[in-house]
Every structure is written in C-alpha cells, then in structure tokens.
Image (cartoon, grey):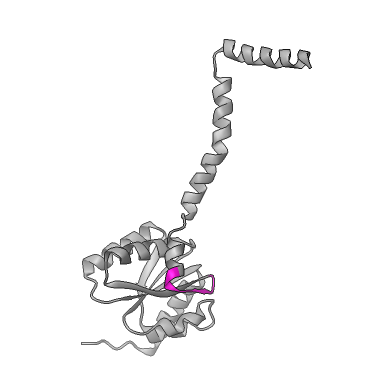
Amino acid sequence: METKVDRTEKKNLVASLKDLFEGTNLMVVTQQSGLTVAESSDLRNRMRDAGASFKVTKNRLARLALDGTKFAELTSLFSGPTAVATSEDSVAAAKVAVGFAKDNDKLVIIGGALDGQVLDVDRIKALAALPSLDELRAKLVGMISTPATRIARVLSAPGGQVARVISAYSEKGEAA
C-alpha cells in the first residue's frame, strides 16, 4: 500500500533535499535494491561515522531539488531505486560508498559529482582511494612535529654531549 504525499509535504521534501545538495561538496549517486534493514542501517552508520550521509530519494523530487544546484547535471542518473551519499569532505562519502559496494553487490555506484564536476564510476573509485582530510591533517602534523622532536632530543641530551657538540662547532670555527 503506497501512501500519497500531499503537495505541501512534497514542497518541504524538495526544499530539504535542495538544502542538502547545496550544503555538500560531494554527491555519489547509487542504486540500491534488496538491501535489508540491517544492511541499510550499517551503511547509514558508516556514513555518519565518516561525516557523510546516505539518503534514499524519490527520483522525481530529487530531480526537482537538483534544479539550480551545482549538481543539476546528475538528473539523468535518477531512475530506478536511487539513493545519494553526500559529504562536505571531498572524499568521505565516496570512501564509504565504494567500500560498502565492494562487500555488498546490492549497492551499485552509478555516478556522482564533486563541486559540480561530474564524475563517472572510475573517478569516484579513484577519489575513494585518496586520503581523507583528517588523514592529511595527521600526516601534516607528523611532518611538522618531526624536526621539533629532533631538536628536543638534542637539547635533552646529557650536558656532556651538548658540550661536545658546542666544542666541535667552536673548533670548526677556529680552523677556518
């Protein structure tokens, strides 16, 4: 038994979707059929943990919501049992969707876009292989903190070693 949605509800759903689409950098369009409630909940939880979201859409309403957004070129992908994964992070939604689709053939990635640039399935998979923003931040902090760690190690060395280093530099200066 299908429930009818009145005109006001449809307008609200379209406005809600439009807000979602305008507040995101990445959209991955998927087709999902036969996902169990447990599988669907697992996917949503993984998305949430990664800072992304996963939403099953009504195609007609999604196409209306896409109109006028940077994702407008994706309207042709909305046919069949469609759902979208979105994230502000340029990688998060792709990572989770690709990882989940690898383990579960009931979810198929059909396309997407990053900041309005349309991506095919191969590009989404390549995007998913990139490190996330948090991973890049951790690497950067590691690179910055390494020289400071070395300086601290030298300064924390016993006084005799520091004196030898200073003496060696002073002898080097006298020899020149």
- Residue closest to the eye, 43 or 167: 167
Tell me: residue 24, above or below residue 163: below
Q: Is residue 15 left or right of residue 158?
A: left
- Residue closest to the eye, 43 or 127: 127
Residue 3 in the image: x percent, y percent? 26, 86
- Residue closest to the eye, 84 or 150: 150
Q: Is residue 5 left or right of residue 119?
A: left
Residue 154 in the image: x percent, y percent? 57, 22
Toward which corner of the image does residue 128 lie, by quadrant?
bottom left
The magenta span reads 115-122
Q: Residue at x 31, y 80 (%)?
A: 81
User: Which residue is the extreme one toward the top?
Assistant: 160
Q: Residue at x 45, y 71 (%)?
A: 27
Residue 152 in the image: x percent, y percent? 56, 25
Q: Residue at x 45, y 74 (%)?
A: 120
Find out whether residue 117 is within the magenta segment. Answer: yes
